Image: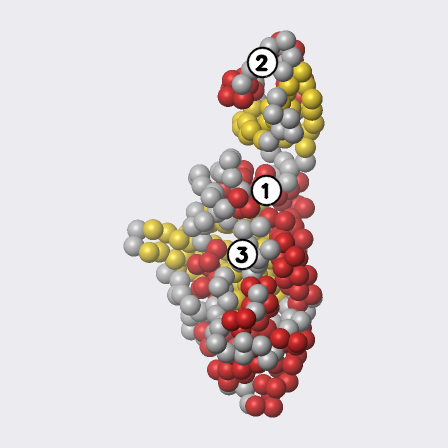
Amino acid sequence: MIEVRDLARQYGSFHALAGVTFTVNSGEIVGFLGPNGAGKTTTMKILTGFLSPTGGEAKVAGFDVVTESLEVRRRIGYLPESAPIYAEMRVIDYLDFIGRVRGMAQAERVTAIERAASECDITDRLHQPVGTLSKGYRQRVGLAQALLHQPPILILDEPTSGLDPNQILAIRNLIRRIGRSRTVILSTHILQEVQATCDRVLILNHGQIVADAPTEQIQSSQAGGALVKVVFGAGTVRLGAPALKALVAALPGVTRVTEQTAEDPEQHAFEVLAAQDVRKELFDLAVAQGLRVWELTKERSTLEEVFRRLTGSAESSPDAGDRGGGSGPPPDQVVRSA
């Protein structure tokens, strides 16, 4: 349904996209992840015809996004991060307006509005002014306009941004239901959303794809060493977190140490990434330093941990504001689905 090959977009000397290549098959729900500035929104805007690429090509349902833009738009439903809805209009009037913009006849619009409203659970809100709706329901209205013309492809940019946990769950369930009969690309900062909703994950960093595989496969293929959680407590010696972190980081094979929140203020918790299992070394360190070990466990790589490794962001994740950075892995280390 979507084929992207060597896609590039340049703004002056800045390369927002630098040779992005991927495909999305019919019926897939694909999660788009990456730190701010990675190229997610740029890619979506190219696919939806809002931007032209400066290199490469992209096809949607077999149509070129540049030379056959109108044919592409007829087959795409797009929901940007801020739903494009008019607060002063009633929901039914807004959807009717969108139908007219898309060239639907009146009878076709009536049927389409009923269908989209039912699909998005807003039938009882059709005669309510958009401005009086909660943000969760406004997002539903935004989804309804994207679905109005029954497109085979949906492109959703941060569809749960700013929603409370109950609203997020409702929209997440709605996307899963909608995705049963459509191809969906979903950009989000919330990693749990990708794990709960998406069949596959694409991770972008600095305008390049650094991972493209099912979530479970990404997590297993990016094991990249041992991930260990250790919690130290005061024993005969009391050390502060900076001193402890430095001692752990100095152990052979350790590549990263991240301080975590401990349950007890007298304890210090760390997540340790190393080339090999360093639980024995951590235990020996505690003995040598007169510390108590409250927890020492080998952990499975999570999608958040994989994201941090691939984007070079050790202290943050998309859930914490998507403040990724760093160089990421070179193109020859891209994770691909087998």
Q: Position of residue 18 (x, y in %)?
A: 41, 52
Q: Reading the chain from its start, which is encountered first: label 2 or label 1?
A: 2
In the rendered image, the vertical position of residue 96 relative to residue 277, given as above or below: below
Q: Quadrant of the N terminus?
A: bottom right
Q: Residue type at mark 2: give it.
A: Arg
Q: Which circle's residue, 3 or 2, is located before the other in the chain? A: 3
Q: Nearer the viewer, residue 56 or 315?
A: 315
Do tag 3 and tag 2 residues touch (Cβ < 8 Å)?
Answer: no
Q: In whole angstroms, how far apart are the C-alphas of marks 1 and 3?
A: 20 Å
Amino acid at pointer 3:
Gly
Q: Nearer the viewer, residue 321 or 187?
A: 321
> Circle 2 — which element?
loop
Q: Residue at x 57, y 69 (%)?
A: 133
Q: Residues within 10 Å of mark 3 (few under 14, many from 20)?
A: few
Say which element carries label 1.
helix
User: Quick one: label 1 or label 3, which is nearer the N terminus?
Assistant: 3
Q: Quadrant of residue 24?
A: bottom right
Q: In the picture provided, is 52 more to the left or to the right than 12?
A: right
Residue shown at the point (40%, 62%) measured from the top left: 53
Amino acid beneath label 1:
Glu
> Residue 120: x percent and y percent?
64, 71
Question: Where is mark 1, residue-wise?
Answer: 304
Q: Nearer the viewer, mark 1 or mark 3?
A: 3
Which mark is in front, 2 or 1?
2
User: What is the secondary structure assignment of the residue under circle 3?
Assistant: loop
Q: Which residue bears the numbered disc 2?
A: 238
**Would you place residue 281 above or below residue 216 in this image?**
above
Residue highlighted by disc 3: 162
Q: Position of residue 282 (x, y in %)?
A: 63, 18
Q: CA distance from mark 2 to mark 1?
A: 32 Å
